[in-house]
Amino acid sequence: MAATPTTCFHYTIHGQGPLPGHALDEMEACGTCGMECYAREFHPFTACVLFLNLRNPETVREHLHRVIEWARSTKSHAEHPHDGI
């Protein structure tokens, strides 16, 4: 059984920069799901699963953004639990 990728192979995680030969605004289809992504776009395997079901890249981006924002707020609360939140 093949390992499931956690990120698409031609995108960097957390926007650390494009791979050599990729422009920042260049769009390229993900080899796993076919979603058109920017070279610096965070595109985990979860995004592939969402895209294969929703078929709308903007909806996928919105869902990922909400999860990332929730994770940031949860982390902040865990680090400072007595700040009145």
Image (cartoon, grey):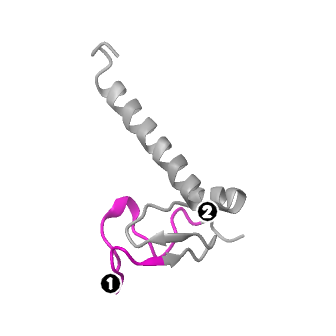
Q: Which residues are magenta?
A: 5-27
Picture residue at 28% right of the left edge, 22% below the top: 80
* Residue 21, image x, y percentages: 34, 87
Q: Residue tagged by mark 2?
A: 48
- Magenta segment's dominant SS is loop
Q: Nearer the viewer, residue 9 or 41?
A: 41
N-terminal of the two: label 2 or label 1?
1
* Residue 82, image x, y percentages: 29, 14
Picture residue at 31% right of the left edge, 12% below the top: 84
Q: Which mark is residue 20?
A: 1
Picture residue at 46% right of the left edge, 76% below the top: 27
At label 2, the amino acid type is Cys
**Quadrant in which the C terminus appears:** top left
Circle 1: element type: loop
At label 1, the amino acid type is Pro
Give residue 41's quadrant in the image. Answer: bottom left
Q: Nearer the viewer, residue 68 or 63?
A: 63
Give residue 60's quadrant in the image. Answer: bottom right
Q: Which mark is residue 79?
A: none
**Quadrant in which the N terminus appears:** bottom right
Picture residue at 49% right of the left edge, 70% below the top: 37
Give residue 83's quadrant in the image. Answer: top left
Is residue 20 located in the magenta-colored stretch of the structure? yes
Instruction: Please rate how many residues cluster around mark 2, counting C-alpha atoms within 10 Å: few if below 14, some from 14 to 19, many from 20.
Output: many
